[in-house]
Image: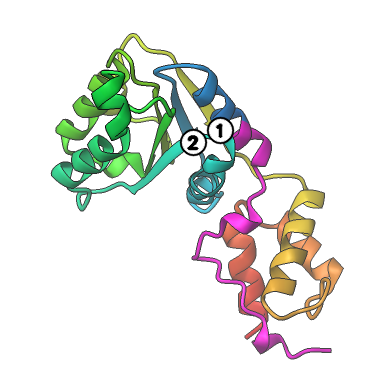
Amino acid sequence: MRKMDKIILNPNVPDPTFMVYKNEARRVMLKALAGKSECFWVLGKTGIGKTTFLLWINKFAPMYKLKSMYFHGGNELNFEEFKNSIEKATKASFFSRIFLKKKYTEAPIAVLIDEAEHVKDERIWKYIVSKLDEPGLNFSVVMASVQEVEEIKQYFKGRDIEKIELEKPSTDILMEMIRKRIEAGGGEGYQPFGKQLIKDIIESSDTIREILMKLEEVAK
């Protein structure tokens, strides 16, 4: 049996490799591809996997021919840098601008904003709305926060925002995810913790991060 102190689970490091809400994330990407001006709001407790959800979309979007951009929200999100990044990503190619007279790329764009509740600069929200309204641009936004924020909702007044509420997955799904994390962290199968201990921790925890933190505590 391997020593427990060799198991590294990294509970505070979101890793899209172990994402457990893939069906919901695929649905978001498919709707962003098919529609225009789509708005999504990923909601859930701290530690349930919202950041991992966005990072998974950001990682796999190219496979769906979707151009995604991930931004971590908060006061440190600089408006000019945010705007310049999006302007660069949405700009049509040289050929399209010169010969087809197109202003924007034909590729659908999905802007992912994590911890949206901490974005206080109203210019960011107004800019996003302006892009949603831009003719000829397939632009969607995916926000993530613990709960809906009335101040943010005001900027999207009159628009349909699809809510994706992340809840604790089934024990079976979590057991499989933890097995993969254990093996990636140096363990084998459910060892060195044991299947029953993991199951008990899952059932006594509310979020994925809490489960991983408890297991890491046991491994010390």
Residue 7 image point, x, y percent: 67, 81
- Please tell me whether mark 1 sits on a helix, a strand or a loop: strand
Residue 60: % across, % down: 57, 45
Residue range of the region highlighted in magenta in the rendering = 1-26
Residue 92 appears in the picture as rendered: no
Check disc 1 and report the residue beneath it.
Answer: 165
User: Magenta stretch: residue 10 in it?
Assistant: yes
* Residue type indicated by callout 2: Leu
Q: Is any atom of residue 141 visible in this view?
A: yes
Residue under numbered circle 2: 43
Residue 13, which numbered label?
none
Query: In which quadrant is the N terminus drawn?
Result: bottom right
Report the number of numbered marks: 2
Instruction: Tell me what residue is drawn at x 53 percent, y 51 percent.
Output: 52
Reply yes or no: does residue 24 show up in magenta. Answer: yes
Q: Amino acid at mark 1?
A: Glu
Quarter where residue 142 is shown? top left
Local SS, label 2: strand
Q: Quadrant of the C terminus?
A: bottom right
Residue lying at 27% horizontally and 33% vertically, measured from the top left: 94
- Indicate which disc, 2 or 1, sits on the residue closer to the N terminus: 2
Side (left or right) of 191 relative to 164:
right
Q: Are the residues flagged by discs 2 and 1 in contact, CB closer than 8 Å?
A: yes
Q: At x 21% / y 28%, what residue is drawn?
A: 127
Q: Residue furthest front?
A: 99
